[in-house]
Amino acid sequence: MQRVPFDFNAERNLNVLSNAAFLTTHFEGKTNVMVISWGALGFMWRLPIFVAMVRRSRFTHSLLDKSREFTVTFPYADQTKAVAICGQESGRRIDKLAASGLSVRAGQSVATPVLDIPGMQLECKIVYERLMGPTRLDKTINELWYDRQSGNYHTFFIGEVVDSYLTL
């Protein structure tokens, strides 16, 4: 593990995110990992932040509501099998870690683990959340991403990045 600033390799990490990164959360003995390809890295309130978008219908959403923290893994090696399983299956039905062959290691600053794969790790504590809706959303975006989903809007979870490092 090598500690680095949260914006280390930002261009590379955002490129990874646009394809597939992993968001992990943990509460009362249950760890769940999901694939994310939307998010934002930056500063708010003079804090380094990562904004994760999670639909209310997702099992991860219910865990985030309780745990109030998450980790993000930007994989630097091919994770095709894990992306397929963690992106298509629900943690309500299966143990995605076991099914995908992924393992975890303890977080350094949060109770939620990180994936034990080569890449950049962010550990985040939720400082704000907001459910989006159609009122102020561009009509084209709403029609493209939400009308087909019966209004299953994302919640924006704004996490303060409390630790960041590379794992090899």
Image (cartoon, grey):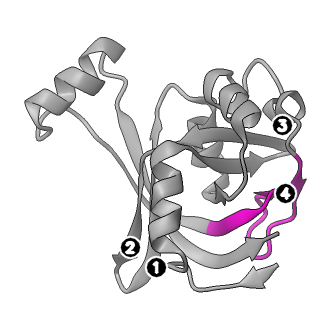
Between marks 1 and 4 in the image, the one whose residue lies nearer the viewer? 4
Residue to which mark 1 is pinned: 48
Q: Which mark is residue 116?
A: 4
Earlier sequence position, callout 1 versus callout 4: 1
- Residue 42: within the magenta? no
* Residue at x 44% of width, y 69% of height: 11
Pick the front one: 103 or 159: 103
* Residue range corresponding to the magenta coloring: 103-123
Cβ atoms under marks 4 and 3 closer than 8 Å: no
Label 4 crowd (10 A; few <14 / some 14-19 / many >=20): some
Point 71% across, 46% down: residue: 78
First in residue order: circle 2 vs circle 4: 2
Ranked by sequence position, the earlier of labels 1 and 2 is 2
In the rendered image, which quarter contains the C terminus? bottom right
Q: Nearer the viewer, mark 4 or mark 3?
A: 4
* Vertical side of 17 occupied by 139: above or below: above
Residue identified by numbered label 2: 42
Give the amino acid at mark 2.
Gly
- Please tell me which residue is depicted at 76% across the width and 47% down the height of the picture: 27
Q: Amino acid at mark 4?
A: Asp
Which of 121 and 54 lies nearest the eye of the viewer?
121
| Mark 3 residue element | helix
The quadrant of the rendering that contains the N terminus is bottom right
Q: In front here: 77 or 96?
A: 77
Measure the C-alpha gap from mark 4 to mark 3: 11 Å
